[in-house]
Image (cartoon, rainbow, N blue to C red):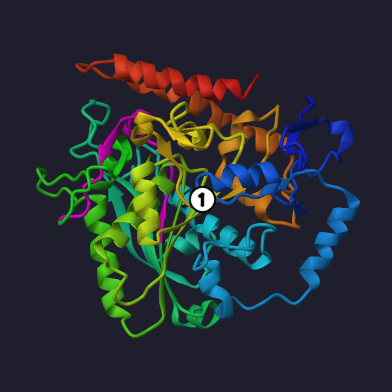
Amino acid sequence: MASSTIQILNTKTNNHVVFSDNFRPRRPQFSLPMITETTSSVRQLSSSYSSSSVAATLLATPTTTAAAAIETRRPQPKLANRWRDIQGSNNWEDLVDPLDPLLRREIIRYGEFVSACYKAFDLDPSSKRYLNCKYGKKNMLREVGLENSGYEVTKYIYATPDINIPVHTGADCSRWIGYVAVSSDEAVRRLGRRDVLITFRGTVTNPEWIANFMSSLTPARLDPHNPRPDVKVESGFLSLYTSDESSSKFGPESCREQLLSEISRLISKYRGEELSITLAGHSMGSSLAVLLAYDIAELGLAKNDNIPVAVFSFGGPRVGNSGFKKRCEELGVKVLRVVNVNDPITKMPGVLFNENFRVLGGRYEFPWSCSCYTHVGVELVLDFFNMQNPSCVHDLETYIGLLKCPKTVDQDVDQISQRTNMIGEEFLNKAKDFILSAQNFNMLPWLIAAGSKVNLVQSQRT
């Protein structure tokens, strides 16, 4: 077996330290027995853009494992009594440093709902359900192993990438992107409220990859009464969110229209009950979740009923500029970002021009700061990397497995390799595949974008 390494964050110097297999048990390959305290340098960096962070240690020792096991035997507080805090009513203050056990369980739970999107998405070109969900709404959660989740799917959501590139041969190019679900009456007693859940999968199809490669900012213009030209978001994500197929006879409405309509219906249906709206997504899906949260807040859909709206983001990229971040904070948009420091997607777009380069010496703001991409929300940082399987840095299942503390990811490394290597090959080759299949469009912008993304991934291998 080839030697692998796991990196952790040094809590004194904030530098990466590499441990070889000789300094840790052979199995499990990954474990998360405890959460270390945030370093002072991380706190200082976080305060510069109002984002909290906590580093997760991946080195298993008998002492910490035993301590974590004791923690699980302690009586845990009931979610019904603390659900507003868990949903970010106080911006998760004192809950991420150290990571609160109840919050950890909720993050894992919502991550598994997002994972269901991948398990249910049909990528078989010979299937009648190609680019759609494999299952009907009544059976979907049961088919993916979430039959006891206490939620019922109410609507499927489709997105249409508005990309002028002939990579799809069907009559339309909408794809199943996620679903809306509502907690059952029985689950309401456990959760303490009726929870409306919207989940989004990450990038899978070719036009979605192109949308991800876009790096231009464009005004969101989601408020019909105030265009707010200073509030800008990444054009590819906005395209996925707002494009429709109205020109097609049976084409669906935009992802935005589908979601706002269903959310409004559910708010009306359950008016009078305590209600929450939870948005969860991975990678590109987390961007759609943040856009939807901003849209709900800007339109005031949940304001009159005082319904909390929270986003649980896994491996999400930046969505908008500093104006977008400022407006989200003014509206009280709550976003908890679970990120791996070694995940290149979380550093895009805005690899160079981002929240860390807007201000010189903490005092002088550059003229181009309005064009800098900026993360939104509170950040929960994991730090994992495997030399043998570099593509695991963005794998949602690895994110979830590492959060299941004190339980460990009890998988053989060969099984992990098989899955992550497949993802890695797709990650590196997608750009080339769809560019070579396209015709009649300017290839230069896509080649530049694709090259930048591949270089970021390849840097993880060195």
Q: Position of residue 153 (x, y in %)?
A: 38, 66
User: In the image, 223: left or right of 275?
Assistant: left
Q: Is residue 388 left or right of residue 370?
A: right
Count of marks overlaid on the render: 1
Residue designated by label 1: 50
Q: Is residue 341 above or below residue 404?
A: above
Q: Is residue 398 visible?
A: no
The quadrant of the rendering that contains the N terminus is top right
Residue type marked 1: Ser
Q: Nearer the viewer, residue 150 or 311?
A: 311
For residue 383, say whether it is visible.
Answer: yes
In the rendered image, residue 219 lying in the magenta stretch gets the answer: yes
Q: Quadrant of residue 148?
A: bottom right
Q: Is residue 84 magenta?
A: no
Front position in the image: 131 or 74: 74
Residue drawn at x 76%, y 54% is 34
Q: Which quadrant does the C terminus fall into?
A: top right
Highlighted range, magenta: 198-224
- Give neighbour class at mark 1: few <14, some 14-19, many 20+ (Cα, 10 Å): some
Q: Secondary structure at mark 1?
A: loop
Residue 459 image offset from top left, x and y in percent? 59, 21
Instruction: Note whether 138 is above or below 385 in the view shown.
Output: below
Q: Position of residue 453 (x, y in %)?
A: 46, 24
Above or below for 65 versus 195? above
Q: Farthest residue to the bottom: give it.
A: 272
Q: Quadrant of residue 102?
A: bottom right
Q: Would residue 60 appear left or right of 411 to someone viewing this image?
A: right
Residue at 48% of width from left, 43% of height from top?
316
Residue at image x 66%, y 53%? Answer: 403
Residue at figure coordinates x 69%, y 49% from the top left: 38
Provide residue 127's location: percent of width, then percent of height: 35, 42
